[in-house]
Amino acid sequence: MGRRHPAHRHRRRGDSALRVPDRLRQQGLHSRHGVLLADAGKLDLDAPVTDVLPDFEVADAAATTTITPRHLLNHTSGIEGDYVNDTGRGDNCLARYIEGVGSVGLTNPPGATMSYSSTAYNVLGRIIEVVTGGTWDEALKELLCDPLGLEHTMTLPEEVLRFRAAMGHMGEPGETPVPTPLWNMLPRSAGPYGGICAPAPTWRGSPRPSWTAAPRRTCGRPEGHLRPLLWHLTPVSHTPAKTVCAGRRNEKDAWIPVVFYALADGTRYVHFGVRATAKAA
C-alpha cells in the first residue's frame, strides 16, 4: 500500500503510522471527548467556556463570556481558525496555548454562522484536560482509543517510533512531491486539531473502528435536530485555481468567504471561513 519516493529505500506498508491527513477526521475523533464527558455529566455543552477555563478569553470581550463548548464542537464559535503557537513539548503546552488566545479575533459573532476553527478545537482540548485531570493525549487514549481497540492510534512522536512511520510529502501541483524537512511540522500544542497519527486502514477501507461504544449525540443543536446546511452564494472572483464567493445561510448571518479550490484530480474542495488556504489533492 502506498508509493515509495525515490529518496527513500522502503515502501510504505499498510500498517505504517502516518499523520491522519484530514483534519475533519482528526477533529471528529477528538470531538468524541467532549460528547462522552457531556453524556457522563462532567461537561455542560451549553455553559460558557469560562465556567471551566476562568482565564479563557478572546479579543472580543462579549464573545469571551458567551462562547460555549457546543460552539467549539460545531465550528460556530467565531474564533479565528489558524492560531499556531509553539508552547513547547511539556504537558502544560495547551495551558500555555490558551494564554495566547486572548489576542485572537473573531470571524463572526458566536453562533451566527459556521467557520472552521482549529483554534477552537485546541480550546476544547484544554477543557478536556481540566475536566479529566490529565493531558489531552492521555484522555484520547483512555476515553476512546483503549475502549475502541485502536492500539496504533497515537499523538506523540515517541509513541510513533515504536512502529514503522510514513513520511509526509509536500510540493506544488504538477510537481513531484518531496519529503517534508521534519516528520512532524506541527508543535505539540497543535495536538487536538492536527496531532493524531494512525495506520491508513484505520481511516480508509476496511476495517474501520466501530463507534457503537460511544453514545450517539448531536453537537449541532441542543434539541438533537440538525437542519440541512443550505447556503446562499454570491460569486466574487474566479480563476482556474479557485472560485471565491460570499456566502451566508440567511439574512441574519454575516457574509463569509466560501472558496472552491480546484484540485489536481479535477474535483473541488470547499472551505468556509476567512482563513481559507489551498489544500493539496
Image (cartoon, helix red, strand yellow):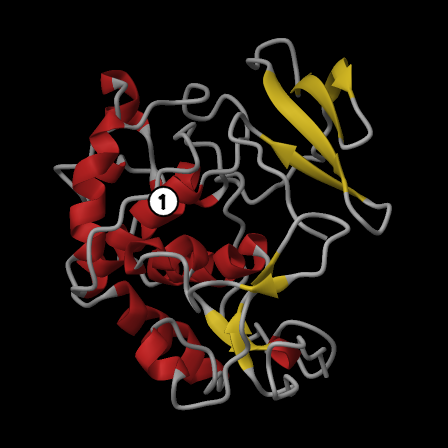
276 on left or right of 201? left
Residue 34 seen in render: no
Residue 257 in which image quadrant:
top right
Amino acid on which disc 1 is placed: Leu
**Label 1: element kind:** loop
**Residue 48 versus residue 237 in the image, above or below:** below
- 148 or 170: which is nearer to us? 170
> Does residue 110 appear in the picture of this structure?
yes
Please indicate whether residue 77 sits to the left or right of residue 95 in the image.
right
In the visual, does 91 lie left or right of 37? Answer: left
Q: Nearer the viewer, residue 252 or 95?
A: 95
Considering only vertical position in the picture, is 211 above or below 220? below
- Find residue 70 and report its horizontal and vertical position in percent: 41, 41
Residue 40, position in %: x, y?
Answer: 33, 63
Q: Find the residue positioned furthest to the top.
A: 251
Q: Residues within 10 Å of mark 1 (few under 14, many from 20)?
A: many
Give the residue at the far front of this rendering.
7
- Against 237, is 279 above or below? below
Give the quadrant of residue 191: bottom left
Comparing 200 with 184, the one in front is: 184
Query: Residue at the spot x=28%, y=64% of the render?
Result: 136
Residue at the image position 35 percent from the left and 42 percent from the top: 69
Q: Residue furthest right?
A: 266
The residue to which callout 1 is attached is 45
Depth order, front residue of 58/163: 163
**Quadrant where the N terminus is found in the figure:** bottom right
Q: Is residue 11 above or below residue 249?
A: below
Residue 65 at x, y = what percent? 24, 26
Identify the residue at horizontal 31%, vertical 80% (top origin). Answer: 158
Q: Residue at x 44, y 36 (%)?
A: 81
Q: Quadrant of residue 67?
A: top left
Residue 9: image x %, image y %?
61, 87
